[in-house]
Image (cartoon, rainbow, N blue to C red):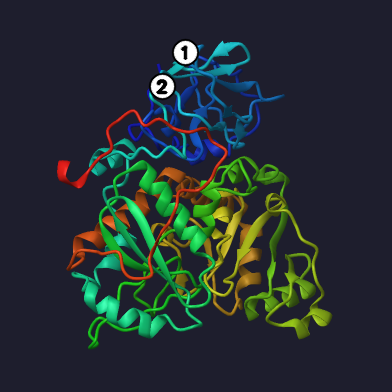
Amino acid sequence: MRRLPGAALLPLPLPLALLVAAGAPEAPVSAPRSLVWGPGLRVGVVLPVRYFYLQAVNSEGQNLTRSPPGQTLFKVVIKSLSPKELVRIHVPKPLDRNDGTFLMRYRMYETVSEGLKIEVLYGDEHVAQSPYILKGPVYHEYCECPEGDPQAWQKTLSCPTKEPQIAKDFASFPSINLQQMLNEVPKRFGDERGAIVHYTILNNRIYRRSLGKYTDFKMFSDEILLSLARKVLLPDIELYINLGDWPLEHRQVNETPGPLPIISWCGSLDSRDIILPTYDITHSTLEAMRGVTNDLLSIQGNTGPSWINKTEKAFFRGRDSREERLQLVQLSKENPELLDAGITGYFFFQEKEKELGKAKLTGFFDFFKYKYQVNVDGTVAAYRYPYLMLGDSLVLKQDSTYYEHFYMALTPWKHYVPIKRNLSDLLEKVKWAKENDGEARKIAKEGQLASRELLQPHRLFCYYYRVLQKYAERQSSKPKIRDGMELVPQPDDNASPCQCLRERPSREEL
């Protein structure tokens, strides 16, 4: 019997040698020998969309390395354990990741007291240890029922014990002087052009006040903090979140006064902001399977044709938010056999539209019809990068001073191909990829596998909590609800009311 990997929440690694196998047809799928694992099979992992993985295994006990021939016969059926409990659960078709693995998703709109039965089938035959029983209660995303023991919650999610980017960010802040923050942040960053929100989390309730004119994006910071507070008891904390594109704090550690721990969605080599996962991937995770098309899960089942059938060109579509993007279009005009690049909207360089032309919008999934993807910064880091890395094209990444929370875990020439800031070596790198197809494919696959692990939705929740935890440990005084703050209400949603079947935690009990 094939055993599951030790890290049960992570996708099963596939030997790269097998990934390039071709030729003789593989033996038929064996339902009992196939493997099923992942967070969606754990009752305590409450996520907007629950998910788990399936590795197809043939009758000889070998992992399939490409999709089984014909129509996909895998399916998932999820029901309440009790016939008296009617529950709405959206269960789409499995996502075929085109390498012998499948991604299964489901979104709950009710809490079930008794529990769930999850049947994973290949045709009419049960796969692996199906059916899987999740003994209740099983809570849906909008159920306000936080786990009172944060350590237990992190263990249930298999949160990493170390996050290098968090350690690096907090190295500049061995302690956090809350009074200094209160005195300086409004003066330095809270003018009418500011995009700062001042949050206090107290007794697991979220309070905020806006500083500056451009704070509409607080909807994104609100929704993730509320989602976390529904799942786990948050530390009492008072902090400032930057909703703008650019990181704010450029003071050096050896300066007097020193840097302030502003929290942002994007970092840079010349700033000291503490970085969270971007609002883009966070929002798409919270709204997956309702209201958004691209998210960290759906992208994995829509990566275009197989490698051998992709167009051998580098591809780019995007707005004119950086001058190098205009250079890309000019390079494309001069070298159409190597590069297909176009600007879909002009704002910063409107005078260039007549010269360079305007490209039609292209659905993101169609990007992956091309073997090579060019990632060029926008105003800051291009927030499409995580989605590109989850595809199975080779990513050519521009050298950049900007970074997102997961960049430290990726290595050039192992997970992606670097290109110079001024794009002077882009065509050379595209030619290299065409002449070294096996190596290019290997790098693309390594990048995809690493990103599948790093960008699992449950890892985002782990990351957010760890940042709040580290911040709270360094805060010098108790947080308070300040004048002008308002309670952020839980959202109205289309889920049924939730009965929390465990006692509400309190600080005094911990």
In the rendered image, residue 59, in percent from the top left (x then y), is placed at 54, 15
Instruction: First in sequence, mark 1 or 2: give its number.
Output: 1
Q: Are marks 1 and 2 in contact (CB under 8 Å)?
A: yes
Q: From this view, report whether residue 445 is shown above or below residue 190.
A: above
Q: Is residue 131 left or right of residue 102?
A: left
Judged from the image, the secondary structure of the residue bearing numbered disc 1 is loop
Quarter of the figure that contains the C terminus: top left
Q: Residue furthest front?
A: 483
Q: Residue furthest bottom?
A: 256
Q: Is residue 107 left or right of residue 234?
A: right
Q: Is residue 20 left or right of residue 225?
A: right
Looking at the picture, tell me which residue is in the foreground, 68 or 103: 103
Which quadrant of the figure has residue 307?
A: top right
Q: Residue at x 66, y 31 (%)?
A: 23
Which quadrant of the figure has residue 145?
A: top left
Give the amino acid type for the residue marked by disc 1 in the picture: Ser
Q: Is residue 37 left or right of residue 416?
A: left
Q: From this view, report whether residue 508 is shown above or below residue 413.
A: above
In the rendered image, residue 346, in percent from the top left (x then y), is placed at 73, 76
In the rendered image, residue 498, in percent from the top left (x then y), is placed at 44, 32
Q: Mark 1 and mark 2: span between their CA atoms? A: 9 Å
Numbered label attached to residue 113: 2
Looking at the picture, tell me which residue is in the foreground, 60 or 189: 189
Q: From this view, report whether residue 67 is shown above or below residue 134.
A: below
Badge 1: residue crowd in 10 Å (few <14, some 14–19, many ≥20): few
Residue 163 in sight here: no
Quarter of the figure that contains the N terminus: top left
Numbered label attached to residue 82: 1
Residue 437 in sight here: yes
